Amino acid sequence: MRQEVDDIHRQGGTIAFVPTMGFFHEGHLALMREGRKRADNLIVSIFVNPTQFGPSEDFKSYPRDLDRDIAMAHSVGVDCVFTPAADAMYEEGHQTYVDLTGLPNHLCGLSRPGHFRGVATVVAKLFHIVKPQVALFGEKDYQQLVIVRRMAQDLNMDITIVGVPIVREPDGLAMSSRNTYLTPEQRRSALALYESLKLARERVARGITDATSIIEEVTAFIGSHAQTKTDYVAVVDPQTLEAVDRIDSPSLLAVAVWVGKTRLIDNTILSP
Amino acid sequence: MRQEVDDIHRQGGTIAFVPTMGFFHEGHLALMREGRKRADNLIVSIFVNPTQFGPSEDFKSYPRDLDRDIAMAHSVGVDCVFTPAADAMYEEGHQTYVDLTGLPNHLCGLSRPGHFRGVATVVAKLFHIVKPQVALFGEKDYQQLVIVRRMAQDLNMDITIVGVPIVREPDGLAMSSRNTYLTPEQRRSALALYESLKLARERVARGITDATSIIEEVTAFIGSHAQTKTDYVAVVDPQTLEAVDRIDSPSLLAVAVWVGKTRLIDNTILSP
């Protein structure tokens, strides 16, 4: 990979990079299509990163299908798929981590301790290997996007971080590799996440700006669906991720919901 | 700086980098001379990094003399001296740190909590700005050298880390910007550090391999000098920095001593 990257740079080429955990869906392909437009060379990594999974999380069962992924990547013009092995990424004696002191203490970071330390560390590592000018991240993992952007700025990385809008199924469910875990009944309940975001947008459009009443209504709506258990429903500042009381400027509504044993997330901007 | 670095890389040039806190002495110049040999372009940074000083340490009083430093740097062929401002290096909202879980829990890290987090973070930042192929660090700050090397390896930084031997005054005192703090009496006592390392090497040459007896003798020797207070005397594995009981392979003897209000360090390899 390093050889390939150095050859590109020697020839004055530019690199767009999409780091992923594989098992591609249209959301990943949207990142790749956007990357394709932004540089001469498009590199995608597939690495299910052990350090961003908690001990009771789905690292082992996370869906994988490398052959299918490579075919899909090539179909949208990816030049190179980078698939490092876990023991090459984390050698014996590995002990260096990149961590943020503020942004992980919100939303998913609260129920997934250490998750964003793992994310920031592996993204920094991949950036050092791939040396891109541009890197693309989905807005579905909104907190991840904000954290990677902050990391790149704080550590003076000379990389433009681009966020790409959420891609949804025809009925509105946000695309996720974890959707494959859902039973048919759970798949129906999972739509509650998207429906609840729409509900909140309607309320705000009608002039409701009190975050607490929005949160209560969204939580109740989701809770009325079979097999759901809300992890969080939050209205936060889109930059700092701190909770807001009143939606008097564009605010992020973010939800995380267990549907059966599958944890799903979704978000939208609420604009008053 | 970024413009300059990109121009160099566009023209296929290589960069050697010496990050410093300024107030140059022969030790810094040795790093620069070594860097001069290893790349087409030699960049030196001068930045007294606030995040690596503890609240009761000498950040404010740390000696500075930029005009003299720039003249000295140019005299050994430095192409560019980079002197960022503290508020440019740490913008409002900065919250990203690089930290290691093992190596800082030894030697200086024990008496300077957070010090190596500050070092690793600022070195990562400077590496991202200067984009060197080679970076040079003095062996006097041995723990720092090991930590930077580990960080570069763990985070897949494509940078060769070079350690440069300690440069000493004619009588043996290791060069340090902090030597300027010493009164004439303290300056005489400070020689105890180097003398104690020589003593230990003699003992090992005569077949003594018990680390405890070496440590005791070194500690007693230093303690017999006016105004000294030993912070630590340790015999450790040169890679892991873990204490060793028996010197049956090359081991690092490291000492940190308060001489008056000045904390000095020195080290040597003990080879059986």
Image (cartoon, coloured by chain):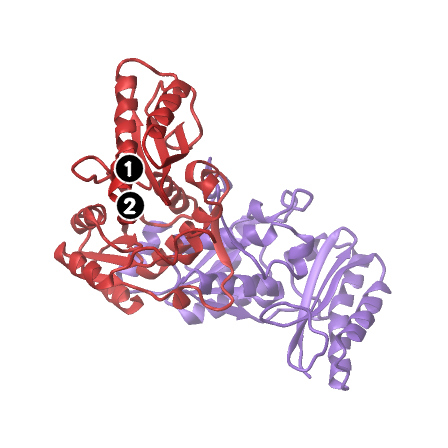
Chain colours: A purple, B red
Asked if residue A81 can be seen in this view, the reply is no
Circles 2 and 1: CB distance less than 8 Å?
yes
Residue type, mark 1 in image: Ala
Residue A29's tag is none
Kindly indicate whether the residues beneath marks 2 and 1 are on one polypeptide chain. yes
Tell me how far mark 2 sits from mark 1, CA to CA: 8 Å
Q: Residue A66's spot in the image, x, y percent?
A: 54, 49
Residue position for label 1: B190
| Quarter of the image with the N terminus of chain B in it | bottom left
Residue type, mark 2 in image: Leu
Q: Secondary structure at mark 1?
A: helix
Q: Is residue A174 above or below residue A53?
A: below
B40 and B190: which is toward the camera? B190
- At label 2, counting other C-alpha atoms closer than 10 Å, the crowd grade (few under 14, some 14-19, many 20 or more) is some
Give the chain letter at badge 2. B
Q: Residue B268's spot in the image, x, y percent?
A: 29, 31
